[in-house]
Image (cartoon, grey):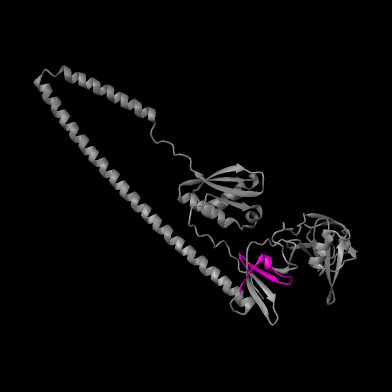
Amino acid sequence: MFKLIPLAALFFVGAALAQQVDVSGKDFLSGAGDAKLATIAQQAAAAGKALQVTAPSYWQGKIAAKLHAGAADVEIRASDGFFENVLVKIVDAAPAKPSVDEQAVKAAAEKAAAQKAADERAAQEKAAAEQAAAARAAAQAAAAKAAAEKAAAERAAAEKAAADKVAAEKAAAARAAAEKVAAEKAAAEKAAAMRANMLKNLNGGRPADGDVQVGQLQQGDVIYVDGNLRGVVRRGSTRLNFYWLQGELNLDRIELSPNGDGRYKVLRAIDTSAAPVLRTRAGSTLAAAVPAAGSAARKDLQDQYAEGREVTDSVTPSNLRRGDIVYTGTGVALVVRRAGGQFARYWLVGSLDLGQIGLQNQGGNAYKVLSDTIK
């Protein structure tokens, strides 16, 4: 039995500073986007930058918590968004306020200049006396010496600060490089382990028989999903063949039927040039009726959950039994019931609260009936 191993965001390598990340509402609520948020927070903090967050106001608190989990001291600026997704951009941090009041500095300089002028006038008045001239010369010599000493001290302090800054930058660069190498190594090892595990579980440990593109999938193929890793099992003439699936594939397409955790059966070939049609996900309350003969909704549910056979019988929500599986669509629902060693199928007729305790969501549009008292 194939076991799902969560990937958990191990594909981040941090090779360059990302300017923004976009997390869908689904990934944000499920936690699948946490790694992206933590990563961009760490990058912004390391670069001395701030983060501009655009999202619905009722998500801002959770978003800030996830970003601060990545970098506790990163600056966050919130902006309300109209759509249920999260956009985080790296922006310049607010400039630091000057530590010295420029007006006070100017006033002090003017005061010093005025005092100096007064001193010079006083010195000129006493220039006639030799004693005053000697005193003035001594004072000037002392001031020059003090200024030279002060300038030398300032130069030494500036040189030391520059040297310390260079050393700190080199140390930070070395740490970042080491962390990057470690992350890349861990990601590569994890990916290799996942591939080996999938080959072991689905292909007896043998190498894959090659790659297949999405447009090459055939009816009856079974797709196994583990994070971003996707494998395809196809029945050959003498044995099962295993391939790596390449290319983008929306697992909610109607050509795919969920068949367990991380497993999808291909109902028919996929036309990659046509716009995809997705399985409908119902809301909290479903008003179901028997779909019209020949309608797309009827055909889709019969193809996916009735092996393409015509379903003629119907049941109301109060007739649902424990163990039934309800597959929902837009205004329609198909009930699959085990009867002995076979399956019976019915159209659901009536209003069904999908959030009630007696129903358990099995993922996607599938609900399992847990009680015989469904309303």
Position in image of residue 295 (x %, y %):
85, 59
Where 257 falls versus 277 (above or below)? below
Give whichever of 135, 193 is nearer the camera: 193
| Residue 223 inside the magenta-drawn segment | yes
Give the residue drawn at x 68%, y 78%: 240
Q: Quadrant of the N terminus?
A: bottom right
Q: Could you say which quadrant of the image residue 191 lies in?
A: bottom right
Q: Which residue, as the protein is rendered here, is positioned at the far left?
A: 130
Position in image of residue 53 (x %, y %):
58, 46
Q: Which residue, as the protein is rendered here, is positioned at the far right?
A: 313
Q: Which residue range is magenta in the image?
A: 210-230
Residue 48 lies left or right of residue 164; in this view the side is: right
User: From this viewpoint, is residue 242 visible?
Assistant: yes
Position in image of residue 75 (x %, y %):
51, 45
Tally the numbered discs: 0
Give whichever of 125, 345 is nearer the camera: 345
| Residue 183 inside the magenta-drawn segment | no
Give the residue drawn at x 20%, y 35%: 146
